Amino acid sequence: MKIGLFIPCYVDQFYPKVGIATYELLQKLGCDVRFPMRQTCCGQPMANSGYEHLTQGCDANFVANFAEFDYIVCPSGSCVLHVKEHLHDEKNEALSTKIRKSVFELTEFITDILKVESIDGHFPHKVGLHQSCHGQRGLKLSQMSELNAPFFSKPEQLLAKISGINLVSLNRKDECCGFGGTFCVTEEAISVKMGKDRIKDHEAHQVEYITGFDMSCLMHMEGILRRENSPIKTIHIAEILNSSTMKIETK
């Protein structure tokens, strides 16, 4: 299968190691991965701010860059959800519809498409997993605590089998960190307070790292942790899964 690697603009600019880890991991899992060099922002910030009518250029560029691929994989649940729900191209709506159905968040792609159950990585640290809202409630990457239904978490499923990892069970597994894209700009004080509350749960469990599948949420918490001189670090799940991937188990 031919995979197009979709890297969000903030990852490209601020966290390139996450993009590299995603690329390397997919290669180790046997995928033919390509990175379209002309890709830009998917348009999510504009849409979140009420200017979706100005994203036609972003949409057309996305379609042009990813039309040739069987699947499109991205290490960001929020950007994937935006494309799935908002990508349109008036000149080729059939193609944009196909692309919306072909784009996947990284852990979703690994578990649902590649059918990989475990990755033989090694990360000997105490880790707290942040379940970002877009991925959890939009992409259904994990179960929501308010539902009376069996628990599942695709990211946690992969992390739990990493050698040496101590994956803690948080008190509030699916609480928002307060980032919310442009919400952290328009409602800065509330956003920061929510971020501090979210971090307290991780601090109570004395984690060394906070991980997740959305670098935007991790970026928000990282800023708070740095300002408080906390020893806790943030790391994207792709970087943990890519720590060592020699042995792969599939269904």
Image: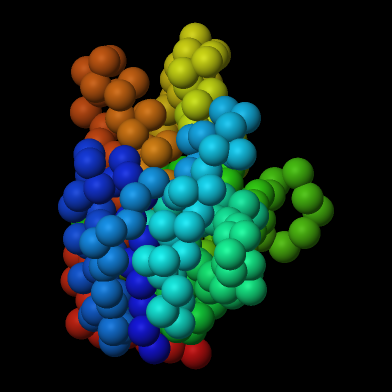
Residue 112: x percent and y percent? 54, 77
Residue located 45% across and 49% down the image: 58
Out of 235 and 150, give the one closest to the viewer. Answer: 235
- Going by the image, does 181 lie left or right of 143? left
Q: Position of residue 167 (x, y in %)?
A: 39, 53
Location of residue 70 with respect to 221 vertically, above or below: below
Question: In the depicted view, which residue is nearer to us: 72 or 60?
Answer: 60
Q: How is the image coloured?
A: rainbow
- Kindly indicate the quadrant of the structure image that contains residue 37: bottom left
Residue at image location 37% in from the left, 29% down from the top: 221
Residue 99 seen from this side: yes
Residue in the image at 45% along x and 82% along y: 70
Residue at the far top: name it. 189
Quadrant where the image shows the N terminus: bottom left
Residue 168 location (% of width, % of height): 43, 48
Q: 35 above or below 7?
A: below
Q: Measuring 58% from the left and 60% from the top, which residue is drawn there? A: 89
Q: Residue lying farthest right?
A: 148
Q: Position of residue 26 (x, y in %)?
A: 30, 75
Taking depth in this image into account, of 214 and 10 the one nearest to the observer is 10
In this rendering, is residue 128 above or below 65? above
